[in-house]
Amino acid sequence: MSIPQAIFELAPVLRAKAVSPLEVTRRCLERIEKLNPELNAFITVCAESALAQARAAETEITRGEWRGPLHGVPIALKDLIDTAGIRTTAASALFANRAPTKDAEVVRRLKQAGAVILGKNNLHEFAYGGSSLVSHFGDVHNPWDTSRIAGGSSGGSAAAVAAGMCFAAIGTDTAGSVREPAALCGCVGLKPTYGRASTGGVIPLSWSLDHVGPLTASVADAAIVLQAIAGYDPADITTADVPVADYVSALSGSSKSLRVGVPHAYFYDDIDPEVAAAVEQALAVIKTLVAEIKDVALDVPTNRKLQSAESYAFHAENVAKSPEKYQAETLRRIMSGANVSAQEYILRRREMEEARRSIREIFGNVDLLITPTMPIPAPAIAELKKTPEALRPAELKLLRNTRPFNVWGLPAISVPCGFTQSGLPIGLQIAGPHWREDLVLRLAHAYEQATEWHKRHCGE
């Protein structure tokens, strides 16, 4: 039989032994071999260990020891997530040969769920950017149009999922780095609540803003992967001991009682006309799925000094010793935090905590918020590489709508909601209250099922 393209369809087929994990893993490795030279989505491919894991999964499933819907499913990891004995580079010459001795907590949980680890995805160096054009291992290309960026910083992860090179990938999101590439590559990207998934063993960009989350082909797949990685990690001070919902069951809940807020000011300003049209069409569909849609006003946090200061704090020693090992633009961004004073840092940290508390008030009137994920479709690589100055404003604009949700620490998802006339994907962002990933997933799934966008695959 043919191999399904989504985890929620593949899992029962694997469990029934109608398809072998080995067969599925081989198909992914073949696609990587075929497509990666052009897309550059993977830095390291773990073919031998992936096949060994697939064989082990096949043996366990044959014995009736099925571990759940990720058992035998090939996934990939952004290459700043530690993997024992496998190099974790953060796309930097500084860590080009760094091989951790211990798996990150999310990797441990994925292996426990029976997932097959295919390899490590390319990214924007040290996750400090939204284009994935600044990498020791070269540019990542968008599978829908290889002259365009895949987004960042989890660009390789989104490109790999969109191109069918893996069934899911784990990315990180500090200002939009899961949702932005998901939107630009036409897949699903979920940033859970701050503290929902462990960042233990993940090379940080900003401890106060970093989130770990899945990139997948469907909302149901995002729920499945989040179920595996979510939960308290006693070794990670950023995680919270808050009960984890049954995300997969939440998908079948009705969206009819949900109240949706649309923050037009800021989030809908200066948007590409094709993006605006697609989002308005999406809102028209959502209006039929929920109880109410109304305008809301949000006080949007925009200060980036907290991120700058924390990034510099992590990199200061290595920057002093080996500045030449960093890409020039990454070094410039890191050094922007060198002059942030202790007073300034404390004030910005306090502002963030206040923002995270005050945003709760909006959810007294609405259950969810909806915005365009990106104000613009994927820019051309050549345009962003014209001058060093071209990259910075483009990335700031790309991350404009996603960054505030990191400051607020709210769960937010990007789902496909259309395409431009030239065939570039457009994303819709749905966000909810702290710890209510179940509500975010419920509406995202209802919208996905009411439309056809998720059925379009690049190369078809």
Image (tube, helix red, strand yellow):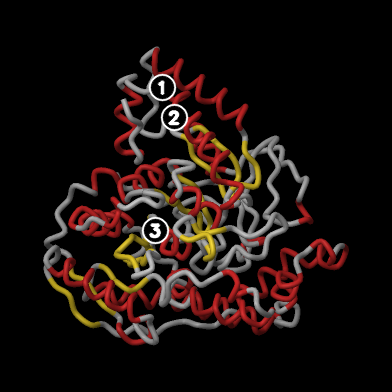
x%, y% of residue 317? 82, 64
x%, y% of residue 22? 47, 23
Q: Nearer the viewer, residue 88 or 165?
A: 165
Residue at image point 11% right, 66% down: 288
Name the residue carrying label 2: 24
Query: Identity of the amino acid at label 2?
Result: Val
Say if mark 2 contacts mark 1, CB within 8 Å: yes
Name the residue carrying label 1: 20
Name the residue carrying label 3: 186
Query: Identity of the amino acid at label 1?
Result: Ser
Q: CA distance from mark 3 to mark 1?
A: 28 Å
Q: Secondary structure at mark 2?
A: helix
Earlier sequence position, callout 3 versus callout 1: 1
> In the rendered image, is residue 145 in sight?
yes
Please indicate whether residue 104 sits to the left or right of residue 160 in the image.
right
Query: Identity of the amino acid at label 3?
Result: Gly
x%, y% of residue 145? 48, 61
